[in-house]
Image (spheres, helix red, strand yellow):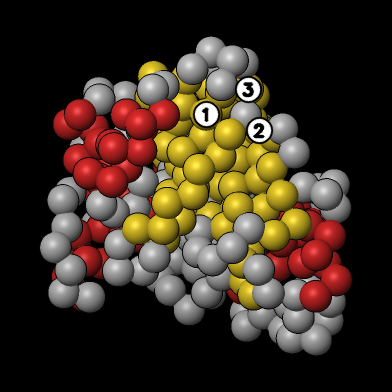
Amino acid sequence: MKVETLAVGAFQENTFLVIDETKGESVLIDPGAEPERLIAAVEKSRTNLTAMWITHAHIDHVGAIAGVKRRWSVPVYLHPLDLTLYRHAHTQAAMYNLPFDDPPPPDKELADGDTLEVGTLRFEVVHVPGHAPGHVMIHGNGVAFVGDCLFAGSVGRTDLPGSNGGHLSRSLEKITALDPATVLYPGHGPATTVGEELRSNPFLNGTARIVA
């Protein structure tokens, strides 16, 4: 497995190109902006893009879907509880005066316990609401794509429409129950590990409190 991180757009959101080198297949997780860069990365990898997996539907995680979809008609996977955010992403963009290319409707629903596949790789979907109602974590093969639930040294915002501090706290318990060596790929900033966050993240070691 190979994971390529591309920080894109005004929010420097992490889009991940996940590659199964055995079969030459790939997926994009959270194609947030700059579709031309993402398309170029896929083409450079010489892989067959098979899907786009969305951890949650905030503007900075869905802004390149339309552009990529025009290049490859691959299915978009989204949890249904984030469908309202997804359909109104253009409203989010207007709040920041950002141009936005409305994504087409998602093709597949994500649900807690689902298995996702790319080539020979298998990943499990875990519903982790709090930052967004339909937020999911995608984990397997020693890594977890955690969207905006957890960052290196911080956690996701709970002051946005549909967010909930209590839900996020319970979701973080699910994430930190993974093996301490699990590499966490967040929606912004550098990768980290479960063990490192349990040790040093103030929201996980009792130094700071998540606002409900």
Q: CA distance from mark 2 to mark 3?
A: 10 Å
Sequence-first tag of 1 and 3: 1
Residue 58 image point, x, y percent: 37, 59
Q: CA distance from mark 1 to mark 2?
A: 16 Å
Q: Does residue 85 lie above or below 115 as drawn?
A: below
Residue 135 image point, x, y percent: 52, 52
Residue visible at 78% across and 57% down?
194
Q: Are marks 2 and 3 in contact (CB under 8 Å)?
A: no
Q: Nearer the viewer, mark 1 or mark 3?
A: 1
Instruction: Kindly tell me whether residue 64 is visible in this rendering.
Output: no
List the residue tagged with mark 2: 124
Q: Does residue 80 lie above or below 175 as drawn?
A: above
Residue 179 image point, x, y percent: 85, 47
Instruction: Kindly tell me whether residue 69 is visible in this rendering.
Output: yes
| Apparent side of residue 51 relative to residue 23 in the rendered image (left or right) | left
Which disc, if any, is residue 204?
Answer: none
- Number of residues whose C-alpha sits closer than 10 Å to that of mark 1, classed few (under 14), some (14–19) or many (20 or more): many
The amino acid at mark 3 is Leu
The amino acid at mark 1 is Ile
Q: CA distance from mark 1 to mark 3?
A: 9 Å
Residue visible at 59% across and 15% down?
22
Which disc, if any, is residue 19?
Answer: 1
Q: Between 144 and 25, which is closer to the camera in this rendering?
A: 25
- Number of residues whose C-alpha sits closer than 10 Å to that of mark 3, classed few (under 14), some (14–19) or many (20 or more): some
Residue visible at 83% across and 81% down?
206
